[in-house]
Amino acid sequence: MGQALAEEKLLDALRAGNEEAFRELVREYQPSLVRVARIYVSNQAAAEDVAAETWLGVLKGLDRFEGRSSLRTWIFRILTNIAKTRAVRDGRTLPFSALQDPGRVPEAAVDADRFLDPEHPRWPGHWAVKPEAWPEDALLAAETRDRLTEAIEALPATQRAVISLRDIEGWSSEEVRNALDLSETNQRVLLHRARSKVRAALEEYLKEAGT
Amino acid sequence: MNEQVEQLSCQELVELVTDYLEGALPEEARLRFEDHIGRCGACKIYLEQMRQTIVVLGHLPEAALSADAERELLHAFRGWRSG
């Protein structure tokens, strides 16, 4: 079934008051809504409030939704507006620069001390401490997953939102850009930093675990 | 391969991995990237680790909604329908 047609059917069901349709919609988007809300508000509880408020906004606007954007984009726009309002009310500075200009502060994917000096006469910028192949079985262990979750939690909120939507929820880069109102370049910068840090955390853990 | 082309260092390569995986590198830069990977075992491992990281992330469970929260939302939905 085409995306547009599926969405049309879903909208019809929602407008007809079909509870199952609403439940499915909520299950599909709630985790992402909370993740994105965390960019703007300070903690998990506040983010969940924002997500709940978003659903009320969705219900209120459903009859007037004309399908000019995708349902997903529309829902995330509602979320972003509510989250921003809430952030202002809570006296939080919005992380606009973090979203609109993530490249302003440079950040290395790998610590500089892992490499030889860029002026090294023979091997400028080559690995000094090389990465070693990971044991496949350890990668899939439950404890590795816990470490992964910790590593994601430790990321700045904007990076966490991008990597969660892309790599955990499996969204396309275009979908993420629309939901977060990001340029292509900025989406990639945030994704790169997030993935690089998560890789580094995995490397550190697997080295510990392997010895 | 044109030997005049300046080669990437490993330190430069790690900053291009996401652009490479996203298919965002211009042709020439992509060739330089792949040329480096072809002859540098350590960077090949690094690229593989980034791919593995993405795969493992894809296996993390998506965050779930608590039963309480879901109940409240369904309650709101019923209210909206009847209101």
Image (cartoon, rainbow, N blue to C red):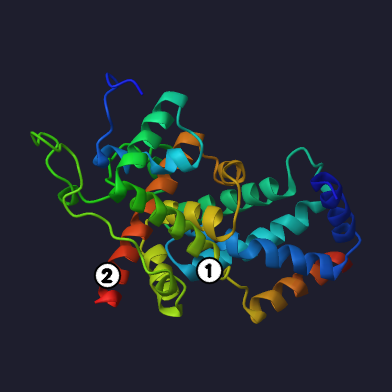
Q: Position of residue A26 (x, y in %)?
A: 71, 65
In the shown orientation, is residue B43 left or right of residue A62? left
Q: Nearer the viewer, mark 2 or mark 1?
A: 2
Provide the residue designation for mark 2. A207
Residue at screen point 45% across, 31% down:
B25
Task: Please identify the quarter of the rendering in which residue A24 is found.
Answer: bottom right
Whether marks 2 and 1 lie on the same chain: no
Q: Is residue A202 left or right of residue B80?
A: left
Residue A40, x across and y down, in percent: 47, 54
Q: Residues under labels 2 and 1: Cα distance?
A: 21 Å
- Please tell me which residue lies in front, A120 or A170: A120
- Taking the spot 59% from the left edge, 59% from the top edge, the residue there is A169
Q: Residue at x 36, y 34 (%)?
A: B35
Provide the secondary structure element on which disc 1 rests. Answer: loop
Observer able to see residue A40: no
The residue indicated by pointer 1 is B60
